[in-house]
Image (cartoon, rainbow, N blue to C red):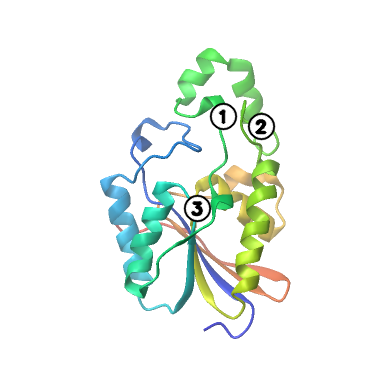
Amino acid sequence: MVASGALIYLFRHGEVVLAETRRFIGHLDVPLSPLGERQSAAQAARLASVKLGALFTSDLTRARRTGEIIGGPHGLRPTVVPELREMAMGRWEGLTAAQIQRTEPEKFAEWMSNVGEFPFPDGESVPDLEARAWPAFESIVDAHAGQAIAIVAHGGTNRALICRTLGLSARRLLAVGQDYGALTILERVGARWRLLRLNERPMA
């Protein structure tokens, strides 16, 4: 039990089907790959001795499945929070970077040079993502003061949340590592946040 504040075990879901093609996945509801299942099991074993008070995941299958595996040793079932869903990538969802560069080279170049603010075509920007995910994250943390909790979300979502807790500009988004299945640990004491671990990959 955390004496004050809250301790957040923030996971990115495990590797997914299509990961090897490096596609923009966004809101596509793809499952974990066999490696993703093993990554989740490895992190579940790592947290087996931690006293978790609650477990939350996004509503996408890859996050929910990761949460089910992590929650198993604790007898916890995930509480689904749709606001923790990955950034909507609009008409680029399902496409590779090479495909987008061929069809929309100017927009792709603009996105690459301004990741923090440029919205995906027909999708969201980082400020859009933060506007829905941060209030949900804060509400979860506020409701579990003095506890350790686990949250399973996505690369973009986690990066946005981490940047917000550390006071970093959204332009730094891609500088924050978030590998498949990785764990980041955040602690809130009063109104202040501390980063205890960042992007610790599972041994799977």
Residue 183 at least partly seen: yes
- Disc 1 crowd, CA 10 A, few/some/many (<14, 14-19, 20+): some
Corner quadrant of residue 71: bottom left
Residue 43 at least partly seen: no
The x, y position of residue 10, in whole percent, is 51, 61
> Which amino acid is tagged 2?
Pro
Which residue lies under the disc numbered 2? 119
Could you tell me if the residues under marks 1 and 3 are in contact, i.e. CB atoms within 8 Å? Answer: no
Which residue lies under the disc numbered 1? 90
> Which amino acid is tagged 1?
Gly
Measure the C-alpha gap from mark 1 to mark 2: 9 Å
Numbered tag placed on residue 184 in the rendering: none
Measure the C-alpha gap from mark 1 to mark 3: 18 Å
Q: Residue at x 62, y 69 (%)?
A: 141
Q: Secondary structure at mark 3?
A: loop
First in sequence: mark 1 vs mark 2: 1
Left or right: residue 94 compared with residue 164 = left
Give the quadrant of the C terminus: bottom left
Q: Residue at x 53, y 18 (%)?
A: 101
Could you tell me if the residues under marks 3 and 2 are in contact, i.e. CB atoms within 8 Å? Answer: no
Numbered tag placed on residue 58 in the rendering: 3
The x, y position of residue 110, in whole percent, is 66, 25
Could you tell me if the residues under marks 1 and 2 are in contact, i.e. CB atoms within 8 Å? Answer: yes
Corner quadrant of residue 182: bottom left
The x, y position of residue 103, in whole percent, is 53, 13
User: Image height check: is 120 above or below 107?
Assistant: below
> Which amino acid is tagged 3?
Ser
